Image (cartoon, rainbow, N blue to C red):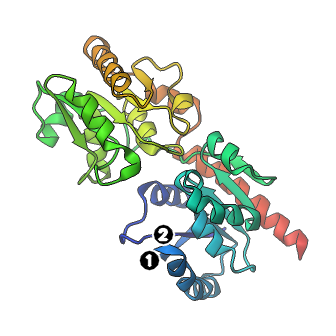
Amino acid sequence: MKILIVCSATNRQIAPFIKEQAESLLACGEMVEFYLIREKGIKGYLHALSGLKSKISTFRPNIIHAHYGLSGLLANLQRKVPVVTTFHGSDINDPRVLKWSRWAIRLSRYAIFVSQQAVEIANPRSRYSVLPCGVNTNRFFPVNKKIARQQLGWNDGEVYILFAGTHEVEVKNYPLASQAVRNIPGAQLVELKGFDRDGVNLALNAADVALMTSFTEGSPQFIKEAMACNCPVVSTDVGDVKQLTEGVDGCYITSFEVESVTSGLQEALRFASNKGRTVGREKIQQLGLTDNRIAGELIRIYQRCVHDEAKKQ
């Protein structure tokens, strides 16, 4: 099958979870190419339409898989090729974008939501499923903490808390994380910035705790990748994090109060001191959130959409 992935790349980079999902489809033997939207805003997406039509003409895909609502809306401005759109969270949680995403939901042959919470907000009528992005468990795996710290140049005796993003991204709510970590004597808050994917794996293994204080999320890869590395987790109750971490000792859900996040960090650090690492990797595997399993589900959705399109003609 020939799959055309349509997504934004305004910073000249494809989001890692989209790129890795494409790699998992390639590993299944599918043909995959990208069409990248390089301008921001509605006008930027509209400017990309002629290029998209040209790409469709040359690649002749069987299916288009768009990522995020605006990309889905663009992809549906052509009606020759059926479109599957994945809604990742920010396109549903932000009311300014939700109105455009709802059009993409209506026009797409099939809609994928990464969490049940997003479904409840978007309220789709039909032709949808909940399917989070999978984790490449060959890329994210447990490494001895001491070895990981040596490779990163981190001090062996320090307390490191890895933050799920950078302070510049407002939705990640860095001020809450910073205030809570200041209450932990000697702890260092490390932003997830400047790491390549292998570096992220090392950082998750080197950190004592993975911390996410976001205002909103869909199905955050940071949490799933932390769990794949057996790293203790502290997170606000956003997206599907509670469902992901349920039953995993060393993972704690907090409110948006500084005291709650501080308490969660203290509990997680106490767990790390006594027991070391979690069994989060086992939970990810139990939930079927590996990239190859998710790729198989996607291929079945594509095949169904192509079949339905053929019946129409």
Can the viewer see residue 68 in this picture?
no
Q: Which amino acid, mark 2? A: Ser
Q: Which amino acid, mark 1? A: Arg
Is 131 left or right of 160, judged from the image as shown?
Answer: right
Residue at the top extreme of this rendering: 274
At a point 40% along the width and 72% down the height, the residue shown is: 10
At a point 61% along the width and 42% down the height, the residue shown is: 115
**In which quadrant will I find the C terminus?**
bottom right
Q: Residues within 10 Å of mark 2 (few under 14, many from 20)?
A: many
Is 123 left or right of 216, judged from the image as shown?
Answer: right
Asked if disc 2 and disc 1 are in contact, CB closer than 8 Å, the reply is yes
Can the viewer see residue 249 in this picture?
yes
Q: Position of residue 282 (x, y in %)?
A: 49, 26
Q: Which residue is mark 1?
A: 38
Q: Earlier in the sequence, mark 2 or mark 1?
A: 2
Local SS, label 2? strand
At a point 73% along the width and 65% down the height, the residue shown is: 108
Q: Quick one: 121 or 241, which is closer to the camera?
A: 121
Local SS, label 1? loop
Is 213 left or right of 5, judged from the image as shown?
Answer: left
Question: How far apart are the two marked residues, 2 and 1, measured between alpha carbons?
Answer: 6 Å
Total numbered labels placed on residues in the image: 2
- Which quadrant of the figure has residue 209? top left
Q: Position of residue 79 (x, y in %)?
A: 75, 79
Q: Which residue is mark 2?
A: 8
Vertical position of residue 14 compared to residue 244: above or below: below
Vertical position of residue 110 compared to residue 209: above or below: below
Q: Quick one: 253 or 248, which is closer to the camera?
A: 253
**In which quadrant will I find the N terminus?**
bottom right
Disc assigned to residue 9: none
Is 4 left or right of 16, judged from the image as shown?
Answer: right
